[in-house]
Image: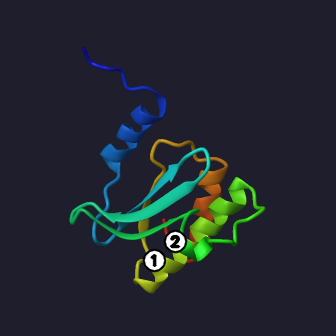
Amino acid sequence: MALEIQGRERRKLRIRKKISGTPDRLRLSVFRSAKHIYVQVVDDIKGATLATASTLSKELKGKLDGKNKTDEAKAVGKLIGELCKKKGIEKVAFDRNGFIYHGRIKALADAAREAGLKF
């Protein structure tokens, strides 16, 4: 008996059919949970994660106290932009992972763009 794929998972599969991380344009994948937000830059051909950041990152420890979730997402977006800049990554394909481009996802994307990423 096959289980039906619902909501976000269906959108995620539809997006992943079109987006793939290649060496010239890596994939910026975002995952949002109830408490935290995670982002990673992936080369799908090599199967390697080149950079990662989240609200649990040691670089952001203590800096997020008292901020709301949207401000935390902005800080994570800025951090991933800086990490990518250090590694020479400029172009990425944004993979919202089935989440609606609104709120925390949009704040993270805007902050990453401000930090120098192009997508």
| Residue type marked 1 | Cys
Q: Which residue occupies 48% across, 82% down?
A: 85
Residue 93 marker: none
| 118 versus 103 height, above or below | below
| Residue farthest right in this picture | 66
Q: What kind of element bears circle 1?
A: helix
* Residue 29 sits above or below residue 43 on the image: above
Residue 25 position, x and y percent, is 35, 68
Residue 62 vs residue 22, the one in the foreground: 62
Q: Would you say 85 lies left or right of 105 here?
A: left
Q: How many badges with numbers are in the image?
A: 2
Residue 45 rendering spot, x and y as whole percentages: 22, 62
Q: Circle 1: is it few (<14), some (14-19), or many (20+) Cα within 10 Å?
A: many
Left or right: where 64 falls relative to 99: right
Q: Report the residue at 49% width, 70% height from top.
A: 118
Secondary structure beneath label 2: helix
Q: Residues within 10 Å of mark 2 (few under 14, many from 20)?
A: many
- For residue 80, the mark is 2
The colour scheme is rainbow
Extreme residue toward the top, this view = 1
Query: Which corner quadrant holds the N terminus?
Result: top left
Nearer to me, 65 or 12: 65
Q: Is residue 112 above or below residue 39?
A: below
Query: Are discs 1 and 2 less than 8 Å apart at CB?
Result: yes
Give the residue number, with chain letter if any, for mark 1. Answer: 84
Q: What's under tag 2, amino acid-wise? A: Ile
**Left or right of residue 9, residue 112 in this image:** right
Q: Position of residue 80 (x, y in %)?
A: 52, 71
**Residue lying at the far left of the rendered structure:** 46
> Residue 39 appears at what percent x and percent y?
48, 60
Query: Alpha-carbon distance for marks 1 and 2?
Result: 6 Å
**Residue at (35, 66) in percent of width and height:** 26
